[in-house]
Amino acid sequence: MASKTPADEGKMPSVKQSDRVNGSAGASGTAKSDAAEASGGESDDDADQHAPEAAVAASGGRAKKKKNKKKKPKKKAATVQTDPPSVLISQLFPNESYPKGEEVSYKGDNSYRTTNEEKRHLDNINSDFLSDYRQAAETHRQVRQWAQKTIKPGQTLTEIANGIEDSVRRLVGHDGLSEGDAIVAGMGFPTGLNLDEIAAHYSPNAGCKKVLQQNNVMKVDIGVHVNGRIVDSAFTMAFDPMYDNLLAAVKDATNTGVREAGIDVRLGELGGYIQETMESYECEINGTTYPIKPIGNITGHTILPYSIHGTKSVPSVKTSDTTKMEEGDVFAIETFGSTGNGRCHAEGECSHYALNGDAPKVDLRVLSAKSLLNTIKKNFSTIPFCRRYLDRIGQEKYLLGLNNLVKSGIVEDYPPLLDKKGSYTAQFEHTILLRPNVKEVISRGEDY
Ligand SMILES: [Co+2]
């Protein structure tokens, strides 16, 4: 998920402050990881073809057993994923044996970290953090790989979003319907389904009639969290091969960012590497050849517990930002490429919102705003949510209150971000952990 960068950063003098945004894009990749091989993939082989049935079989088995408990041996817990996904990740990987992401050794002055005892110790005391992150990442891989083979033109964006989100919630075992449940584990932010010139922050609201078309380029941005550890990773789907080079450019650019990222790396320089890769591509679409431009005012970002946008930004273009990446940082490395201007603006009906972590203390006069704020705090805390998430927990007629919270600065809105009309944009994004002794590309899979 992408966010507005703090106004005072001024890394890109030509950019209006209000215009700067953090993006949540996805990284690409050709590298295969152990994690990827251990994950996803097998869902086809499963005999249980329907999640609801499988779920019933798993739990309902117990009820049946009472009747003829002597005869039947205990029904074994499922050890492979269903289609659609419904088996808990914690069941597929017992005792927190979640697959690792792609581990990459630090280079140069930091290569000592690989074997340094002190750094290894620091890493070891972080086991809860790693376990939560790996569980969220494995959930992400399994759900997105199912989405990649299932999503087809003709589906509505609403059914696509619901399919992804229901799967995520099933795999982490929290449907988010009871108060506080979505804060334990679940969606890390609203699922972005961004078509063509829409780069980020579009998710269907109730009544959305949009249908995915054969000639659309769709960015799928999914967030999964476990105990507030958010995995932010995105990919792009297209059904017409004429967009292949656009997708290849962005995949390569994001992988460049992932590869060059590391402790002590300066963010403005990292942007330069990303830019160079992106601009080495062009794409012919309907007879016109376009240079692929990085979108300059959407950026990657650090991720903090329960907070999708930390304080550091990763630009997709060279900037003068000398801020360094540091040990312990979690980064969403995301880049967006475009056949348009390479700049985005906010346009259209908003779906994404989040409680502002350091919100001003305001005496709310609108009663509906007061009660909605209470609902948001209890159900989402500072995790981004969308209107559909309010609908599904039974909230009604909340728009006045919601707009009031946005105006008061208590809730931040994240409207859709678009490049120029008629352009095509793509995104890839990975979440990386700068562990003391190794860089872990936690969201890496065999798909990207
Ligand atoms: Co992001």
Image (cartoon, rainbow, N blue to C red):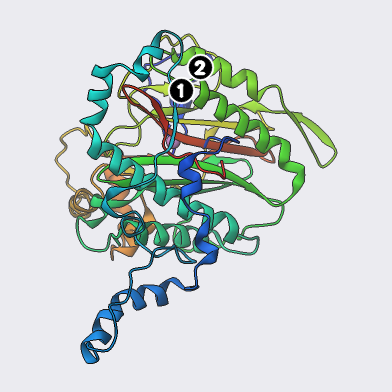
Residue 188, compared with residue 94, is above or below; it is above
Q: Which corner quadrant holds the N terminus?
A: top left
Amino acid carrying label 2: it is Leu
Label 1 environment density (alpha carbons within 10 Å; few <14, some 14–19, many ≥20)? many
Q: Is residue 412 left or right of residue 288?
A: left
Q: Which mark is residue 167?
A: none
The answer to the question of whether label 1 and label 2 lie on touching residues, with beta carbons closer than 8 A, is yes
Which residue is at 51% across, 45% downward? 348
Percent position of residue 4, x then y: 41, 30
Disc 1 marks which residue? 314
Ligand 1 is within 8 Å of the C-beta of the residue at disc 1? no
Residue lying at the far bottom of the rendered structure = 67
Which residue is at 18% across, 54% downward? 371
Amino acid carrying label 1: it is Val
Ligand 1 is within 8 Å of the C-beta of the residue at disc 2? no
Residue 317, compared with residue 339, is above or below; it is above
User: From the viewer's perspective, is the residue at label 1 or at label 2 nearer?
Assistant: 2
Which residue is at 24% across, 91% downward? 68
Question: Element at badge 2?
Answer: helix
Disc 2 marks which residue? 270
Residue 328 visible here: yes
Q: Which corner quadrant holds the C terminus?
A: top right
Q: Quadrant of ligand 1?
A: top left
Residue lying at the far right of the rendered structure = 287
